[in-house]
Image (cartoon, grey):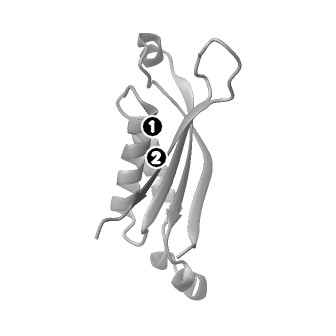
């Protein structure tokens, strides 16, 4: 199955990071989510009930990113992947990318990021 619902470049302000200043000062976080599922039924029926409502995916991502502070972007990605699979029974697999463009490492850097791939068990 290679059909995908893709949300790319979601952006939020939040307070995550290992350093104290990262929890005090909001930074930009960018998120991409790919849900792998069959979209044939939705494509032929034109019924939202036959696919994933990506408004719900967006809101789930927002809740995680704008939720309680965590240290690692890995934790954010894992939470998003878990919630996306739990809320979207049609999805067999999810790919989540979390980017932190404002990371400070002492030199030029577009962003630090993580990508996780999770499959529904069973």
Q: Secondary structure at mark 1?
A: helix
The reply to whether the C-beta atoms of the residues labelled 1 and 2 are less than 8 Å apart is yes
Is 94 in front, or is 22?
Answer: 94
Is 54 in front, or is 2?
Answer: 2
Q: Give the residue drawn at x 46%, y 43%.
A: 62
Is 44 in front, or is 3?
Answer: 3
Looking at the figure, which quarter contains the C terminus?
bottom left
The vertical placement of 51 against 113, above or below, is below
Rendered image quadrant of residue 75: top left
The vertical placement of 47 against 96, above or below, is below
What number is the disc on residue 65? 1
Left/right of residue 109 with respect to residue 117 in the rendered view: right
The crowding category of the residue bearing disc 2, from other C-alpha atoms within 10 Å (few below 14, some 14 to 19, many at least 20), is: many
Left/right of residue 92 with respect to residue 9 in the rendered view: left
Rendered image quadrant of residue 6: bottom right
Is 115 in front, or is 17?
Answer: 115
Query: Distance from label 1 to label 2 (Cα)?
Result: 6 Å
What number is the disc on residue 61? 2
Going by the picture, which residue comes out furthest to the bottom?
Answer: 44
Q: Give the residue drawn at x 45%, y 24%.
A: 15
Residue 113: percent from the left, percent from the top? 55, 35
């Amino acid at each position: 199955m290679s059909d995908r619902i893709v949300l790319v470049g979601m952006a939020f302000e939040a307070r995550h990071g290992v350093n104290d200043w990262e929890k005090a000062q909001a930074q930009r976080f960018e998120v991409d989510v790919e849900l792998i599922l069959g979209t044939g039924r939705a494509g032929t029926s034109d019924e939202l009930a036959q696919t994933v409502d990506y408004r719900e995916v967006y809101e789930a991502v927002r809740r995680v990113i704008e939720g309680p502070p965590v240290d690692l972007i890995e934790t954010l990605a894992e939470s998003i992947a878990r919630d996306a699979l739990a809320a979207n029974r049609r999805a067999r697999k999810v790919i989540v990318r979390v980017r932190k463009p404002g990371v400070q490492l002492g030199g030029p850097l577009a962003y630090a990021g993580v990508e996780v791939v999770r499959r529904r068990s069973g």
